[in-house]
Amino acid sequence: MLDIKLIRERPEWVRAALSRRGEEPVGLLERVIAVDRSWREATAAAEQLRARQKSLSGEVGKAKREGREPGELLASLQELSAQVKERTAAAERAREELDRLLLRLPNLPAEDAPSGEDRVERVVGKPPELGFKPKDHLELAGERIDMERAARLSGSRFAYLRGELVLLELALVRFAIQLLIERGFEPVIPPVLVRERALYGTGFLPDTEQQIYGPLQDGLYLTGTSEVALASLHDSEILPEESLPRRYAGFSTCFRREAGAAGRDTRGIFRVHQFDKVEMFSFCQPDRSAEEHEFLLGIEEELLGRLELPYRVVNIAVEELGPAAAKKYDCEVYLPSEGRYRELTSCSNTTDFQARRLQIRMRPSGGKATVALHTLNGTAVAVGRTIIALLECHQRADGSVAIPSCLHPFGAPATIEPA
């Protein structure tokens, strides 16, 4: 949520920043400014009328004590009371509308987030020179990725993961968690059913309803990422500056309806309704979030390097940012079967957008007034897509796959045998 004080004090600057996202956010901003003005005017009028009401009540009391008839005063007081009630109701309506509009405003993009087109920051590694026609992940996995039986059970875009690929998934998760622990992250297994407040707090509502499973019984939703639960870990708390940054590594199953992806990536497990993921989340000081963003990106790149996967880092264009992100990097891995780079991980700086919605604040050193802190998130391992990349990039001519040695200590097989 944007700071209403910032909007009041620097409307032109906010308008210019939001204009990079398109016309719709600017139109919302104009409505916010107008409704905020109405709310303040109605509130001020109600307060003035209340002051007159209090003064008139004193005059009525004085008249009664002196034995005078307060009829005219009572009539005026009754009329004034009706006006106070009317103005107070108008102020409440304006406040409710203001809150609804503020929830729809996206975050202000960072100045160094590109406009128009994504910007490739760097390419690391070379696409594998296989010397034979590459197979895709389904051909390499065979029944170890069983989509036919999963479709009978759950419908399209679901899969059974079987055999050695289960060991590979567990090794990937343990490998990523161990590295994150060494980098100062606390591991967390969060709930995957959350209340509506958590989704509004992270910016997934009201803008991405079509992707979310829910509301279910008891008003709960299935989350599409553990970012939602990790952000809510400190909901309504005040964190001392000395305790920051606080970094968490969440592992969970994630659920997405993929309602807007009809006809896209229908083959295999690249785009499915249920998948597992290790997610990084950070709470940090406002003046450190840009540095923290690069730190999270560095971890993503380190993981890809250890997995021996060729990738590129893409700085996402402002027009493609989600509502909460001020800046986002994607790491795209090269898939031989498609001959192109595909998104594998991402990391976003959401500045104070989520913290304001969830009322998470920082108490600066020295006991100064509290301020909204900054939050960031990033994918350490999107398990399904990482398995795709490992199978395709490390395949051999006989259909077997060599698994990187970094995963062997965590239980991954050295080789995936031909399907």
Image (spheres, rainbow, N blue to C red):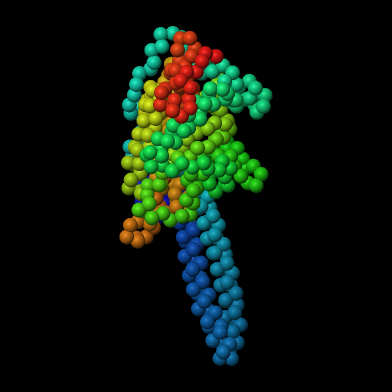
Residue 416: image location, x then y, percent: 50, 18
Q: Quadrant of residue 346?
A: top left
The residue that appears at 45% across and 47% down in the rendered structure is 354
Q: Is residue 317 visible?
A: no
> Which quarter of the figure is the C terminus placed in?
top right
Looking at this view, is 177 or 237 the one in front? 177
Could you say where residue 209 lies in the image, as x and y percent from the top left? 57, 39
Q: Residue visible at 46% across and 41% down?
A: 187
> Where does residue 238 sit, x and y in percent of width and height?
43, 56
On the image, the x and y values in percent for residue 297 come to 37, 34
Which residue is depicted at the point 55% across and 57% down? 93
Residue 119 shown left or right of residue 141 in the figure: left
Count of numbered labels shown in the rendering: 0
Foreground residue, 361 or 400?
Answer: 400
* Residue placed furthest toward the top: 132
Q: Is residue 194 left or right of residue 122?
A: right
Q: Is residue 401 left or right of residue 113?
A: right
Q: Is residue 250 left or right of residue 146?
A: left
Residue 183, quarter of picture: top left
Kindly identify the residue that appears in the image at 40 percent across and 47 percent down. 246
Q: Foreground: 56 or 194?
A: 194
Can the viewer see residue 307? yes
Compared with 19, 38 (above or below) is below
Q: Is residue 53 above or below residue 62?
A: above
**Image position of 339 with respect to 75: above or below:** above
